[in-house]
């Protein structure tokens, strides 16, 4: 299993961050080592094992649909870097 | 001062304020400010609360008075509070003021706890026990050239707060407790509501408690444990009176000592010596030590790194320059996302979320991420089976003592050896406790006990017995 520079570049795009060349190289090396290590843990005893995504058995999270007070708009927008009375402002997706 | 001689313990023991408490309060403001400046323990201080503490003469304790009333606390800066900023140690949330208190904050305030500040922390909790944020490192009161592991550990070790609440995803809280000579409890999964905690790995993270004594942790746990309808992962199992179970006899308790703990490559000889002494003290208390063989236990750190990173990739995706404070303006939306996250996140966090994206990408999803979740099954099953034959498992909390700040980059990486003994309890969800092991002339270490689900009380009873030996 070889992790490539292209893999790291695509992952950083997915994560919406830009890595420096040094960060890319460091991550490539560490990811490669970790993947090899984890592969070495895998044996035939794992083939029939079910994955555990959560440490406890979660019961249904559904509850009665009751109207509850929601976060006021002014509070929801209070931390936004750019907003008006009701909306977040973000750059255009399609250029004019 | 003996470990058990703390403010809460004394208030609880004698039912009244002790001499020194008033003085402690009067000095609080200047001491806390010094802790912020010298040790970088706090990101924010509640000056109003500190001034109130300094001015108020506490009411005499009556029978109805909550034993936590007037007691000082520090919160890790990823626990939301309405009256202080919640930065998560990140430039991304440098000026974020939460619209709500976390569940635990409301519970503490209802009990009369005085929350004096928000503690420094690894950015968004990612970083284990480096203790380094956008605001700099948390320095250790035992040696200022070393990390405290977290600001809450530093603040409690300095005596600027009686206890601290923080999060523990792969063991950071328990490791920081060990670095700072304190006790640190990660309760079982679902024991404490995480509503209002900005966590990075929801299937691993729990809110934990750092304090000087078992009695202090027991009182705080009694206050904040329990079911919360806003956090569906909390369990419907009422919390017992931990302050009562604390006193249970530990004679005959069977402790499973992790086989191979002494052969771990990163284990410092000094830690081994300190832990051997503590294990001997446990035997003197009448605990029975047997060896348990848990081969998958040592795979937990790498497994939790993969799972934690994939979860962080998802949970931290909403910090994109739209809803929260930090934004690098741009003409294009994608460019704004990327520039805001690149400038808003620190170098290690950027690499960690990128690794999460990599491990969950189509190419590696089954081979790496699903395999890690299968390993998690094995680790959990192995722990559960073992805990049918012993009452708890004993191992170091962290293989080394507080590292020098200048050595942090070489000590920590994606898969830090700091997590080798702690990550299994996060993957399985079991409660785990760091017991501080101190020496007269050197840095402290930590012994870790991992218990069965809902057995936090039993773990604390062992610590209590050791404190009173």
Image (cartoon, rainbow, N blue to C red):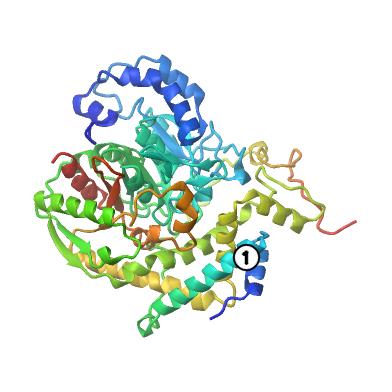
| Quadrant of the image containing the C terminus of chain A | bottom right
At numbered mark 1, what does the secondary structure look like: helix, strand or loop?
Answer: helix
Residue B130 visible from this viewpoint: yes
- In the rendered structure, the answer to whether residue B240 lies left or right of residue B173 reads left
Residue B258: quarter of image:
bottom left
Q: Give the image location of residue B329, x and y in percent.
A: 77, 47
Q: Residue furthest bottom?
A: A44
Say which residue label 1 marks: A24
Q: Give the image location of residue B435, x and y in percent.
A: 26, 47
Instruction: Name the one closer to the observer, A66 or B326.
Output: B326
Q: Chain of mark 1?
A: A
Q: How many marks?
A: 1
Image height check: is B17 above or below A33? above
Instruction: Name the one closer to the observer, B151 or B366.
Output: B151
Residue B449 visible from this viewpoint: no
Image height check: is B18 above or below B202? above
Q: Give the image location of residue B420, x and y in percent.
A: 36, 62
- In the rendered structure, the answer to whether residue B383 lies left or right of residue B369 reads left
Which residue lies at the image location 45% right of the left edge and 35% below the top edge?
Answer: B39
Instruction: Name the one closer to the observer, A58 or B192.
Output: B192
Image height check: is A14 above or below B136? below
Q: Give the image location of residue B17, x and y in percent.
A: 26, 20
């Amino acid at each position: 299993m070889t992790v490539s520079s292209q893999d790291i570049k695509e992952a950083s795009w997915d994560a919406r961050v830009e890595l420096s060349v040094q960060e890319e190289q460091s991550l490539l090396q560490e990811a490669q080592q970790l993947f090899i290590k984890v592969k070495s843990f895998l044996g035939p005893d794992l083939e029939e094992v079910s994955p555990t995504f959560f440490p406890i058995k979660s019961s249904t999270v559904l509850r009665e649909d009751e109207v509850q007070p929601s976060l006021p708009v002014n509070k929801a927008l209070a931390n936004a870097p750019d907003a008006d009375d009701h909306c977040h402002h973000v750059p255009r997706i399609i250029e004019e | 001062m003996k470990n058990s001689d703390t403010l809460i313990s004394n208030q609880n023991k004698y039912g009244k304020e002790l001499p020194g408490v008033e003085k402690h309060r009067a000095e609080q403001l200047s001491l806390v400010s010094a802790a912020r400046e010298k040790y970088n323990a706090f990101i924010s201080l509640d000056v109003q609360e500190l001034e109130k503490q300094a001015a108020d003469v506490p009411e005499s304790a009556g029978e109805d008075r909550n034993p936590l009333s007037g007691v000082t606390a520090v919160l890790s800066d990823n626990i939301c509070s309405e009256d202080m900023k919640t930065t998560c140690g990140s430039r991304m949330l440098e000026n974020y003021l939460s619209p709500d208190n976390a569940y635990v904050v409301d519970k503490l305030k209802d009990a009369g706890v005085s929350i004096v500040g928000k503690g420094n922390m690894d950015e968004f909790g990612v970083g284990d026990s480096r203790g380094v944020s956008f605001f700099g490192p948390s320095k250790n009161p035992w040696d200022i050239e070393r990390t405290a592991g977290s600001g809450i550990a530093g603040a409690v070790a300095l005596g600027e707060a009686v206890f601290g609440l923080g999060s523990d995803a792969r063991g950071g809280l328990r490791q920081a407790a060990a670095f700072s000579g304190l006790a640190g409890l990660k309760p079982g999964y679902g024991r404490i509501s995480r509503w209002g905690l900005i966590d990075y790995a929801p299937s691993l993270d729990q809110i934990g408690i750092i304090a000087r004594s078992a009695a202090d942790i027991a009182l705080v746990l009694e206050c904040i444990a329990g079911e919360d309808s806003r956090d569906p992962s909390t369990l419907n199992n009422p919390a017992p009176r931990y302050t009562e179970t604390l006193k249970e006899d530990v004679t005959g308790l069977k402790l499973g000592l992790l086989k191979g703990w002494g052969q771990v490559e990163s284990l410092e000889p000094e830690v081994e010596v300190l832990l051997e002494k503590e294990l001997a003290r446990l035997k003197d208390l009448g605990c029975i030590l047997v060896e348990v063989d848990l081969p998958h236990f040592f795979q937990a750190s790498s497994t939790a790194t993969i799972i934690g990173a994939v979860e962080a990739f998802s949970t931290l995706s909403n910090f994109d320059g739209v809803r929260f404070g930090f934004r690098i303006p741009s003409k294009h939306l994608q460019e704004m996302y990327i520039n805001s996250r690149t400038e808003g996140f620190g170098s290690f966090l950027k690499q960690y979320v990128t690794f999460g994206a990599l491990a969950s990408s189509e190419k590696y999803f089954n081979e790496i991420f699903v395999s890690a979740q299968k390993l998690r099954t094995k680790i959990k099953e192995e722990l559960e089976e073992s805990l049918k034959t012993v009452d708890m498992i004993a191992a170091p909390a962290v293989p080394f003592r507080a590292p020098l700040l200048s050595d942090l980059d070489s000590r920590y990486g994606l898969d830090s050896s700091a997590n080798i003994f702690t990550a299994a309890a996060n993957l399985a969800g079991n409660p785990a406790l760091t017991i501080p092991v101190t020496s007269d002339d050197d840095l402290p270490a930590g012994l870790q006990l991992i218990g069965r689900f809902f057995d936090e009380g039993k773990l604390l009873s062992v610590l209590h017995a050791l404190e009173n030996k």
